[in-house]
Image (spheres, rainbow, N blue to C red):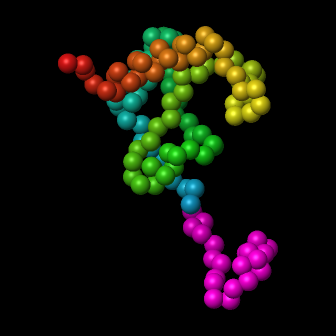
Amino acid sequence: AVRQTLEEIIDNEELEVVPGDDDYLASPASEPREDVTSALLKALGERHPGIEIVPAMSSGGTDGMHFRRAGIQTYGVSSKFSVIGQSSNAHGLNERLPTSTFYDGLDHWVVIIKELAGPSE
């Protein structure tokens, strides 16, 4: 129905409406890297000793899918911890984050960035 409507709107027999790549959103998984995992464990260990990390897939769309399709391993890491059942209204009206979580997140990212950037000279 969409294709037919587009063809009617375009109204030009010299043009053909064809579907795009059906596999557009598909992208391969990024295998965990030792340096990324190590940096994340260090940052988490400073805030929450003994916590484990578990790779997971985000169902939301990110630019990472384009990088992975180009062969560039891509990772998403969050600094946010929340209580089960307490939504932060992510991407919604009145999206919010506790102030302490924001500042804890800054410390989290400083550790990860310094670890991945390598030793300072």
Give 58 or 8, whichever is nearer the viewer: 8
Residue in the foreground of this view, choosing between 117 and 75:
117
Where residue 38 appears, x then y in whole percent? 37, 24
Q: Picture coordinates of residue 14 (x, y %)?
A: 63, 88
The kind of secondary structure the magenta stretch mainly shows is loop
Query: Residue 11 lies in magenta, yes or no?
Result: yes
Outermost residue on the bottom side: it is 13
> Residue at (61%, 19%) from the top-left corner?
81
Residue 75 left/right relative to 7:
left
Apparent side of residue 108 relative to residue 58 in the rendered image (left or right): left
Report the span colored magenta: 1-23
Residue drawn at (28%, 25%) of the image? 118
Q: Residue at x 50, y 45 (%)?
A: 64
Whether residue 44 can be seen here: no
Considering only vertical position in the picture, is 19 above or below 48?
A: below
Magenta stretch: includes residue 37: no
Whole-percent x and y of residue 6?
Answer: 74, 75
Quadrant into which the C terminus falls: top left
Q: Position of residue 104 (x, y in %)?
A: 54, 13
